[in-house]
Amino acid sequence: DTEVTQTPKHLVMGMTNKKSLKCEQHMGHRAMYWYKQKAKKPPELMFVYSYEKLSINESVPSRFSPECPNSSLLNLHLHALQPEDSALYLCASSQDRNGRVSEQYFGPGTRLTVT
Amino acid sequence: GDSVTQMEGPVTLSEEACLTINCTYTATGYPSLFWYVQYPGEGLQLLLKATKADDKGSNKGFEATYRKETTSFHLEKGSVQVSDSAVYFCALSSNTGNQFYFGTGTSLTVIP
């Protein structure tokens, strides 16, 4: 099974709302990622968790708050977002082989619209 | 630093035409190389990979060979189908840390 699941598939939220995106994998991967993707662009890395610890934060605004409750789950908490944060948010996971990233497996994404 | 340079698109081909999407990389050491495909409205799917020089990755009729002498990993298919219409991303996994780099993506449209 090489599936990464994400919920919800679509989300519309106002600038004062608080919402969360969820991601789950059961491949035993110990590295999990959040990416933001704008239309016709490559994914931009936001956060990396390795062995449930935050290892990379690519200078993401604090209105995005990641959480890794266990090795299978990854959340992204959203608060006070701006319209420019509207994008496809992708979760991915990979094996972490001696500090080297293997292929990443992506979920289908959450299409976020901020109004 | 490590990076991937990918052929600009968009690319439009007739069904059964040959496809080549160019990808070159800059990296220290020996990275792993990947091609991902993204169909409209979906996430990225791993299409193929190669982990060392001269490896050939292949899947669904697509092929790419890891060429260290030219630092390239070009994607090829001999006969494209309408269902191959998608955006293709070349990617690199650095062997110097927990980093993954994507190219800019190439949009392919195949017309009947």
Image (cartoon, coloured by chain):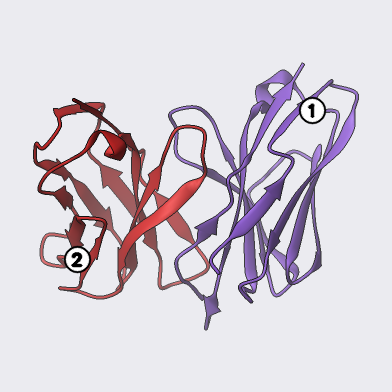
Which mark is drawn over residue B73? none
Q: Position of residue B70 (x, y in %)?
A: 11, 60
Instruction: Provide the secondary structure element on which disc 1 rests.
Output: loop
Camera-side residue: A99 or B49?
B49
Looking at the image, which residue is at 66% across and 54% down? A5
Q: Which chain is mark 2 on?
A: B
Q: Which chain is mark 1 on?
A: A
Looking at the image, residue A115 sits to the left or right of residue B8; the answer is right
Looking at the image, residue A53 sits to the left or right of residue B99; the answer is right
Q: Colour of chain B?
A: red
Which image quarter: residue A40? top left
- Mark 1 residue crowding within 10 angstroms, few (<14) / some (14–19) / many (20+): many
Question: What distance separates the C-alpha of mark 1 from that of mark 2?
Answer: 42 Å
Q: Which residue is mark 2?
A: B66
Q: Colour of chain A?
A: purple
Q: Position of residue A21 (x, y in %)?
A: 77, 44
Instruction: Provide the secondary structure element on which disc 2 rests.
Output: loop
